[in-house]
Amino acid sequence: MQILLDHMVPHELRRLLEGDVFTTQFMGWDQLQNGQLLEACDERGFDVLLTHDKNMRHQQELTQYQTAVLQLDAPSNDPEDVRLLVPQINEALRDLTPGEFVVVG
């Protein structure tokens, strides 16, 4: 499974997730916003985009993408807050289907 961490998701998370994890910075996509980012994910074959963006599901027609979106609902993007969600994130990753939107937290 290929996972992309959105701009504001702590990079430390990549060592704790089950799958091949990349960051938008590593991919050179740190300037891409929602729709552009989802298109790039689809083109590159990413299975999941992890994001803190609570508006993405309302601003984008997510069903047109194969990449699933997993929204992290943590109090902040502080690594300690996000780390608490890791068991839930890994569980959700096992059950995701293409194009699905899931909130974890």
Image (cartoon, rainbow, N blue to C red):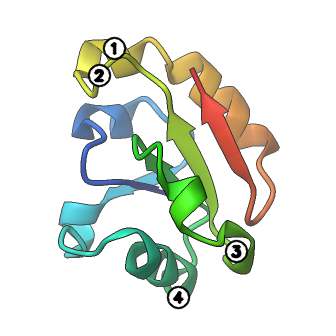
Dot placed on the residue nearer the N-terminal end, 2 or 4: 4
Q: Amino acid at mark 1?
A: Asp
Question: Could you classify mark 2 by the number of other residues whose Cα lies within 10 Å: few (under 14), some (14-19), or many (20 or more)?
Answer: few
Circle 2 SS class: loop
Position in image of residue 12 (x %, y %):
25, 32
Q: Quadrant of residue 30?
A: bottom left
Q: Which residue is mark 4?
A: 43
Circle 3 SS class: loop
- In the picture, measured across the screen, residue 70 lies left or right of residue 37, that is right
Identify the residue at horizontal 44%, vertical 11% (top origin). 84
Q: Which residue is mark 2?
A: 76
Q: Which residue is mark 1?
A: 81
Farthest residue, direction bottom? 43
Identify the residue at horizontal 42%, vertical 29% (top origin). 16
Report the mark closest to the observer, 1 or 4: 1
Cα separation, mark 2 vs mark 4, equals 30 Å
Closer-to-camera residue (75/95): 75
* Marker disc for residue 66: 3
